[in-house]
Amino acid sequence: MCRVTNLLLIDGSPRARSNTGSIVTYLAGRLKDLRATVDVFHVTSRGPSDEEVCRLPAIIRNCDAVVLATPVYFDGLPAVTHSLLERVAAVSVALSVERSGTDCVGAAVVGTGGVGPVFYGVVHSGFVEAAQRRSALWTLELFARAVGWSWQGGVSFGGTSPIDGRPLEEVGRLATVVREGLELAAREMITGGPLSAATLAACGRSPFAFLPRSVVIRLINARTRSIVRRNRIDVTALPYAD
């Protein structure tokens, strides 16, 4: 195990202003505090273009570690993020069968020293229950196996809706678990080793533990009503009633 000095952070949210973006920015800051060089790749709402997929090899070639941060949509990864992983995995399989691929295929799965980088995940959702994010972590682990990267674990944060796309420093107490968890994860990522059970447990804590249950319910309901109003959703609609 050797110290990681160059990391690629993939922002797996297709939204321009997102909670994932806030998490990636904070984690990048903590890694830079530890004297690491950090590059960030953003997944866009239109999905990965050929140009974007071809740009990844040059970045990964200089990386010791890749960290994919993603929200959970309907118990899985966003479609565009899933598409990015599928395309990287596809060129990896093609490369193992035939070495005559295009230039953009050539180093898509190769990191510093000619071997695959270590791979970490950061998964989050508005739901507090860890089970809701488990399938996303399994997806990342299976991807790592497919491309020959060393899976070193993933942290999972629940109740991230209050972040609302703001810098984590501005969110206050409701982002304490996320901030503390990312600081612990950054220290372990920099070693290139697996995330410890203690770090996983720290990240899995409820951000609402300091609040009475009745207050949490009111806050969640208030946010839901706000989203309904903002997006003009008809909550009385019964599209499948017939």
Image (spheres, rainbow, N blue to C red):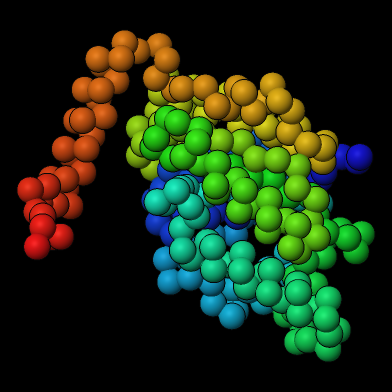
Residue 38: x %, y % from top left: 69, 49
- Front one among 241 and 66: 241
Residue 82 locus on image (x, y percent): 54, 63
Image side of residue 157 versus residue 148, left or right:
left
Whether residue 24 is visible: no
Task: Compare residues 54 and 86 and report the one nearer the observer.
Answer: 86
Relative horizontal placement of residue 85, taking residue 130 as reference (left or right): right
Q: Residue furthest front?
A: 242
Quadrant of the rendering where the N terminus is positioned: top right
Residue at 83% x, 76% y is 96
Residue 101 visible, this angle: yes
Q: Residue at x 61, y 64 (%)?
A: 85
Up the image or down, 11 lies above or below 192; here it is below
In what quadrant of the picture does the C terminus appear? bottom left
Image point (58%, 27%), residue name: 203
Taking the image as shown, residue 203 lies to the left or right of residue 236, namely right
Question: Residue 3 in the image: x percent, y percent?
Answer: 87, 40
98 is higher (above) or lower (below) than 26: below
Residue at 78%, 86% in the rendered image: 101
Which quarter of the figure has residue 213?
A: top left
Instruction: Tell me if 156 is positioned left or right of 168 in this view.
Output: right
Question: Is 142 in front, or is 149?
Answer: 142
Count of labels in the image: 0
Tell me the quarter of the picture where residue 226 sits: top left
- Where does residue 175 sit, x and y in percent of width and height? 45, 26
Q: Write down the quadrant of residue 219 in the picture.
A: top left
